[in-house]
Image (cartoon, rainbow, N blue to C red):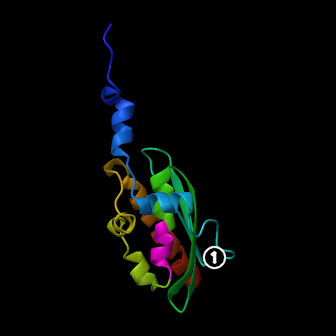
Amino acid sequence: MIERSEAARPEARREQQDLYSAAAVDHFTSPRNVGGVEEPDGKGSDTNPACGDRTTITVRLRDGRVTEARFRTFGCVAAIASASVLTELAAGRTAAEARALGPGDVISALGGLPERKEGCALMAVGALRAALVDAQVRARA
């Protein structure tokens, strides 16, 4: 009988690759801005079709600035950490500055993400941008 070493198992290789920084673990275990903004100016969602994770972000804008951003995520460590840190990055910025935030900003703020989890940062950014577009549309109505 041939025995496979622990490192040869596909699950073990994935677990070794999925090492998270202290910042990512902190945002996962103590996420900031969880929930929804009451009576938001904008609401947006995005889904990662590869895994089914979903993030929804709601925002409040005053004088063209994001005064509050909150999130709800159904997903993995990286999805929750990405949404949490992005709400912090967006707060206080103008809508244009918040819209310009990209996945690289999220990944950098988290001290990196495993390569196969970088799509979670893109999902969070997609939800924020959708919320900002929704706020813009509502303001024109």
* For residue 12, above or below residue 134: above
Q: Find the magenta span and give its range.
A: 85-91
| SS state under label 1 | loop
In percent of width and height, residue 120 lies at 42, 56
Main SS of residues in magenta: helix
Quadrant location of the C terminus?
Answer: bottom right
Residue located beneath label 1 in the image:
40
At 49% from the left and 85% from the top, the residue drawn is 92
At 38% from the left and 73% from the top, the residue drawn is 101
Q: Any magenta on residue 86? A: yes
Q: Nearer the viewer, residue 40 or 75?
A: 75
| Residue 6 shows in the view | yes
Hey, what amino acid is under mark 1? Pro
Which residue in the rendered view is the most extreme toward the right? 38
In percent of width and height, residue 50 lies at 42, 44
In percent of width and height, residue 137 lies at 53, 78
At 38% from the left and 54% from the top, the residue drawn is 119
Q: How many numbered callouts?
A: 1
Residue 122: which quarter of the image?
A: bottom left
In percent of width and height, residue 93 lies at 45, 84
